[in-house]
Amino acid sequence: MATNGNVPKLKRMLALLDRLLLPLTLTALALLIIVYLLIWSIEPSIVLLAAGRDLALSVVSNLIPVLIGFAIGFLVFRGFDRIRVEQENEDFTDSVAEKTSSALSQHLVEIKSRVELGNQLVADSLEKGIEKVCTNAEIAVVGSEGLQRTTKLRVIGLGNSWLLKEPKNHQRLLQLLEARAEVIVLLPDPLSLQVRERYMIDEPSTRRLDLPELALRVLKWYQLKTAYPRMILRVVHRYPMVNVTIYDHYLFASPLLYQRRGIDNLTVMFRYPSPGAEMYEDHFNKICDSGSDNVDESYVARLREFFHL
């Protein structure tokens, strides 16, 4: 740990020495020249002093070229070192610029790809007739507004309670029935084993389920059918995978997700007719024609007996 702590100090000392080396060399060179001139100006009167003077002049005169050579070599070295550092910096800058350019190019390609994908999704949505995607809060408003304007109604769902519980929607439903409009309602069949088993596991675990409740929904709709015989009421043998509501000019489709409440689902609103709407309408018609049974007195009697209602 002590050795690692001394490394920064050593680097600082070497950097300081590198900065002071040339000034110190030039200072020493200047001092030697001064000493040389001072010694050279002495006129020795004794032979011994003359010998010492000559020796000193010889030593100093030999040191001066050494220092001059060292200074020149140091300057040349520093020049080459500066060129090397500048070249390394330039190479590093070019490398960073190249990598940045490459990253930006890749990013631009990704952005372009996402934009094209978004455009394709929009194009597909327009082609299939998707008008918008609604949350539960939005579909409650949009669906109710559409119901006020439509002249016929076809619907499949777990209970279609939004048509019975909401006063405004229920009033409009009664108006359609009074006008002898086409009203087709498809519900899951509580007598079907597959429906009962799926109902018990597909609903959220936080919700207390009651199978007779499923049967009571059918009976509520049967009461309306008794009052308005033109209404078509049928029970579906299989658990519905999607809620479908069809108006004059719009079709709404909402998937029934595993162990999720209906209010958590999104609903796709299609223009009708359109390719997307036609696909769900075909699904609705197939279930209505061959995957369901009519709810009549005989069926209701069996339903009441099975659930002891």
Image (cartoon, rainbow, N blue to C red):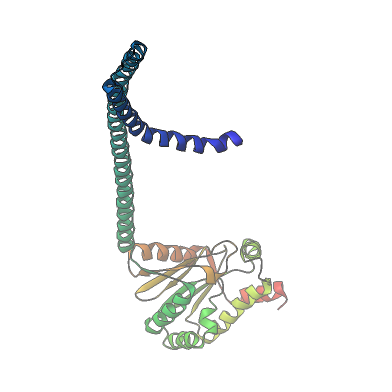
Q: Quarter-wise, where is residue 197 in the image?
A: bottom right
Residue 111 percent coordinates (x, y) = 32, 52
Near-viewer residue (103 or 33)? 33
Q: Quadrant of residue 181?
A: bottom left
- Work out whether residue 19 or residue 181 is closer to the camera in this orientation and state it: 19
When the figure is inspected, residue 111 is found, relative to residue 80, above or below; the finding is below
Position of residue 200 relative to residue 88, above or below, is below
Quick check: can you spot residue 182?
A: no
Q: Quadrant of residue 217?
A: bottom right
- Indicate the quadrant containing the C terminus: top left, top right, bottom left or bottom right: bottom right
Residue 231 coordinates in the image, percent (x, y): 48, 80
Residue 191, relative to residue 230: is it above or below?
A: above
Q: Left or right of 226: which side holds 248?
A: left
Percent from the top left, x then y, of residue 43?
28, 19
**x and y, in percent, of residue 8 in the image:** 50, 38
Query: In screen coordinates, is 12 left or right of 26?
Result: right
Q: Nearer the viewer, residue 236 or 290?
A: 236
User: Residue at 37% across / 12% down in the picture?
Assistant: 48
Instruction: Name which residue lies at 70% across and 71% down.
Output: 306
Q: How many marks do you count on the picture?
A: 0
Residue 258 makes an appearance in the image: yes
Q: What residue appears at the point 55 percent right and 84 percent down from the top-left corner?
A: 165
Residue at the spot x=37%, y=66% of the render? 277
Q: Residue furthest front?
A: 45
The N terminus is located in which quarter? top right
